[in-house]
Image (spheres, rainbow, N blue to C red):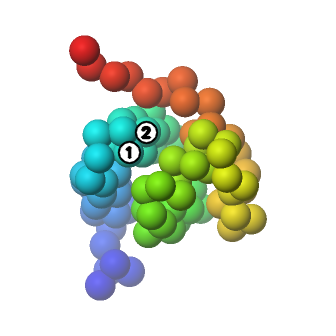
């Protein structure tokens, strides 16, 4: 079924999944990353993010915070952007 989704459908699913992770911290980190960067993604970047969303939040956050080594399949420009954390806007 996922292979039948349009790019817009895939992006909508990613947006929902990135903002409904289960903890506020993960929502801000992963959802904020999606909001900041998704408009510039092509197929390769979108596929990377879809794969990332299959991972556990604690692992994603550890890779972004550099407290654990990022697995080779997720290394590259996108995780480096996530590691900057300059996209997280925490409402007060």
Residue placed most toward the observer, 4 or 30: 30
Can you give x and y, in whole percent of width and height, for residue 58 in the image?
A: 47, 55
Can you give x and y, in whole percent of width and height, for residue 34 in the image?
A: 42, 43
At mark 2, the secondary structure is: helix
Can you give x and y, in whole percent of width and height, for residue 10 in the image?
A: 34, 63
Q: Which residue is mark 2?
A: 29
Q: Residue at x 51, y 62 (%)?
A: 52
Q: Residue furthest front?
A: 67
Q: CA distance from mark 2 to mark 1?
A: 5 Å
Across the whole image, how many numbered discs are drawn on residues? 2
Q: Which residue is mark 1?
A: 26
Can you give x and y, in whole percent of width and height, for residue 90 in the image?
A: 34, 22
Residue placed most toward the observer, 8 or 18: 18
Whether residue 90 appears in this view of the structure is yes
50 displayed left or right of 79? left
Crowd class of label 1 (few under 14; some 14 to 19; many from 20; radius 10 Å): some
Q: Residue at x 33, y 43 (%)?
A: 27
Q: Where's the N terminus, which quadrant? A: bottom left
Crowd class of label 2 (few under 14; some 14 to 19; many from 20; radius 10 Å): many
Tell me, yes or no, whether the two marked residues, 2 and 1, touch with CB atoms within 8 Å.
Answer: yes
At mark 1, the secondary structure is: helix
Query: Above or below — where is 86 with respect to 19?
Result: above
Tell me which corner region of the image, top left, top right, bottom left or bottom right, holds residue 73.
bottom right
Q: Residue at x 57, y 49 (%)?
A: 62
Tell me which corner region of the image, top left, top right, bottom left or bottom right, holds residue 11.
bottom left
Residue placed most toward the observer, 29 or 15: 29
């Amino acid at each position: 079924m996922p292979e039948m989704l349009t790019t817009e459908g895939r992006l909508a699913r990613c947006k929902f999944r990135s903002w409904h992770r289960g903890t506020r911290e993960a929502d801000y980190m992963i959802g904020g990353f999606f909001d900041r960067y998704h408009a510039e993604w092509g197929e390769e970047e979108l596929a990377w993010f879809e794969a990332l969303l299959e991972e556990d939040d604690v692992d994603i956050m550890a890779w972004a915070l550099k407290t654990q080594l990022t697995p080779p399949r997720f290394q590259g420009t996108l995780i480096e952007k996530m590691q900057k954390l300059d996209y997280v806007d925490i409402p007060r």
